[in-house]
Amino acid sequence: MSIDKLPGFNERKQKRLAEATNCVYDESMLKRLDKLEQDATVIKADVAVVKATHATKADVAEAKSGVIMWVVSAVILAQVLPALLKHYLQ
């Protein structure tokens, strides 16, 4: 059975609609609503920027391998350079 077919449903619905049409909208609510709409627009723009510039897993993996190569190179150079300098400066 549909909810519209329940006894008294349409009367209750019509009463609520009639009561809702008597609502008074004040200016402060409209101002707050306008502010929320502006904020939502700004948030949407910020999210678009983040989506456009975020790093993917591949980007992170590539950066990680680059950092590892630099660290390994620096450690090897730190170990080999003193021995080479000692050998050639004597």
Image: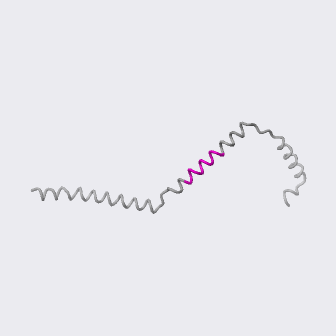
Residue 81, position as x, y percentages in the image: 20, 57
Tell me which residue sits at (90%, 51%) in the image: 8
Residue 17, position as x, y percentages in the image: 84, 47
Front residue of 7 and 44:
44
Tell me which residue sits at (48%, 60%) in the image: 56
* Magenta segment, prevailing SS (helix, strand or loop): helix
Task: Using the rendered view, name the quadrant where residue 26 is placed.
Answer: top right
Front residue of 88 and 68:
88
Residue 31, position as x, y percentages in the image: 69, 39
Front residue of 69 and 8:
69
The quadrant the C terminus occupies is bottom left
Question: Could you tell me how many numbered marks the image carries?
Answer: 0
Q: Which residues are magenta?
A: 37-48
Front residue of 40 and 4:
40
Residue 62, position as x, y percentages in the image: 41, 62
Q: Is residue 26 above or below residue 84?
A: above
The verdict on residue 46 being magenta is: yes
Q: Residue placed farthest to the left in the image?
A: 90
Tell me which residue sits at (72%, 39%) in the image: 29
The verdict on residue 70 being magenta is: no
